[in-house]
Image (cartoon, grey):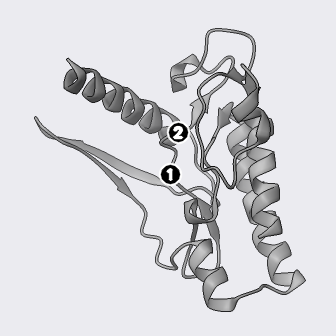
Amino acid sequence: GKHIFAEKSLITQIQREVAILKNVKHRNVVNLIQVLRTDSNVYLVFELVEGGDLAGLIKQQTRFNEDAARVYFRQIIAGLAYVHKHGVAHRDLKLENLLMSSTGFVKISDFGLARAGAGTKSLGGLDSNTADFVTRCGTPNFVAPEVLTDPKYCGFKSDVWSIGVILFV
C-alpha cells in the first residue's frame, strides 16, 4: 500500500526532474550529464561543482561586500530568469541549493520540487493556462507567505520571494 504509493511518487518526481533538466541548459544551472538506470536504481550524473554551496561560503566569509553580493545575485537572477523563461518554477530556492563552481559561478541545483507551468506539458507541466500551484513545498525560512496561506500560488513569484530572502542573508 503506502510503500508502493511512495515509490510511485518518487519515480514521478525523478521523471519530472529529469525532464526539466534535460531541457534546461545554462551556465548558472547545474548540468545534468546523463541518466543511468538499472532494474532497481536510477542514477543522475551531474557536472562536478567543487566549490560547495552558498551557505558554506557565507559561513566562511561571514559577510559579502556589496560588489561580491552583486556578482552572485546577478548570476542567480540570470539562472532563474532562464529557468522561468522555460516555464519552470524551482520552488525550493535556498542557500544550500546554490552551488559554487571552482571558477566562481553560482549554479542553481536540486530541481526535485520544481514544476513546469503552462504550456510545458512535455516537462511534466500543467495542462491549464496558469502557472499556479497548490502543493505546499519549500524550506520554511525561504518560502513565500502565499505558499503557506493561499489555496493557489504562483511558483514564479514565490521563487522571486526566495531569492529576495537569499539576497538579504
Residue at the image position 78 percent from the left and 59 percent from the top: 165
The location of residue 15, given as percent across then percent down, is: 38, 31
Q: CA distance from mark 1 to mark 2?
A: 8 Å
The location of residue 155, given as percent across then percent down, is: 71, 33
Residue at the image position 66 percent from the left and 36 percent from the top: 89
Q: Which residue is mark 2?
A: 113
Q: Is residue 51 left or right of residue 18?
A: right
Is 129 rendered above or below residue 148?
A: above
The residue type indicated by label 2 comes to: Leu
Q: Quadrant of the C terminus?
A: bottom right
User: Which numbered tag is attached to residue 14?
Assistant: none
In the displayed orientation, state which residue is furthest to the left. Answer: 39
In the displayed orientation, state which residue is furthest to the bottom. Answer: 61
Q: Is residue 146 left or right of residue 126?
A: right
Secondary structure beneath dot 1 equals loop
The location of residue 90, given as percent across then percent down, is: 62, 42
Secondary structure beneath dot 2 equals loop
User: Which numbered tag is attached to residue 110?
Assistant: 1
Is 129 rendered above or below residue 158?
A: above
Is 144 rendered above or below residue 155?
A: below
Q: Are marks 1 and 2 in contact (CB under 8 Å)?
A: yes
The location of residue 92, given as percent across then percent down, is: 60, 47
Residue at the image position 63 percent from the left and 53 percent from the top: 26
